Amino acid sequence: MKTNKIFDDHLVKAKDTIAFKNNKPMSCFSGSAVPPTYMDITLADYIFDTDKGFQYFIEFVNKINDEAPIDCMNFGYPGMLPIGTILTWWSKVKIPGRELDENALWQVEEKMTMTESDYDILLNEGFDSLFAKIVPQVGDMADIQTFIKYHMESDVKEAQGYIDNGYPVLCSGAVVPPFETLCGARSMSQFFMDCYKFPEKVKEAQDIMLNKMKDDLTNQQFPEFVIGNWVGGWRGASALVAPKIWDKLVWPYMLELSKILIEKGITPILHLDQSWDRDIERFLELPEKKCILNTDGMTDLRKARKVLGEHVAFMGDVPAQMLATSKPEAVSDYVKRLLDDIGVKGVFVTPGCDAPANSKYENLVALHKTASEYN
């Protein structure tokens, strides 16, 4: 793809940051649902009118960049994202402009769709059979076909748009561990009970899903613009899952999927919602200087730096509530104190998880301005 000097310089800086060769932190934009809050478009149109939505997204990021330099993005424009969430979570998703107000954020519906007996479909008939049973119950297959068609037709065009504007996008997709997908299909409370009642059966089911994912990833030809992919950690967080379950059903799958991505030349961006303090040393099992931990403000990055040293890069971690409710001075102070304590090596400064839709514009400017000016 045709690049330019600004993009090339930012890409080198991003790769240097992952490898701990940087001398300044990266200023990294993350705020997929924020633009409609400040622009003349509804959230529904922003998400589903993808040509228009992409342009609004780029315009919003450029507006911040004019006031406070942005080096890269965590992830880009969230076109049709609620439909993608259906595919990864195997859950119904309430959609703005349909079940919800046109400016309301999409919402995952916490409901058991997969029954206990459905494990046997996975064990006896395979992944595709269970997928064919569950997904049509939670999503409109026409929507899913439109979602797939959109990405097939628009991914390269949008990637060139990011390049033209000088922004490497670190995350181009999501690799969702089996624990998370089954949790969505079974509902959180029921799946956690499954993990205690018949953990070996859950493990056997997850192994089948993992083998399917391994085959898909191994055979996938990643486009040249892909830098990294999320490896999701939401309900598998240390703060939510008992050690004996975490060690058996969460961590081995995140580790294996991360290693496969690295073998393909793709940077795993381990998206870690909630607190992972209890098991932070386990990230030393990842290949050194090949991964990014993307935390949300609840994992203690100061402790993580002491334990992990320069083993994995950090992406974070200004808390979402601070961006929505605090003053710019508080945001700037948070960023300065964080960088004072953990250093700048291997650090992408960005909102924890993602900037909420109601983030104050001036707080986003403060975040990026402080990161870009920090010495």
Image (cartoon, grey):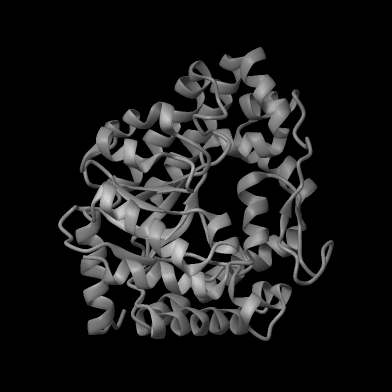
> Where residue 91 sits in the image (x, y, percent)?
72, 45
> Where residue 109 sits in the image (x, y, percent)?
77, 47
Q: Is residue 364 above or below residue 243?
A: below
Nearer to us in this view, 180 or 374: 374
User: In which quadrant is the C terminus drawn?
Assistant: bottom left
> Where residue 3 sits in the image (x, y, percent)?
28, 82
For the point 47% across and 34% down, which residue is it?
Answer: 211
Residue 359 in view (yes/no): yes
For the point 36% across and 32% down, which residue is it?
Answer: 280
Q: Residue furthest right?
A: 99
User: In which quadrant is the N terminus drawn?
Assistant: bottom left
Q: Is residue 121 left or right of residue 1?
A: right
Q: How many marks?
A: 0
Nearer to us in this view, 227 or 207: 227
Residue 252 in view (yes/no): no
Residue 43 occupies which quadrant of the picture? bottom right
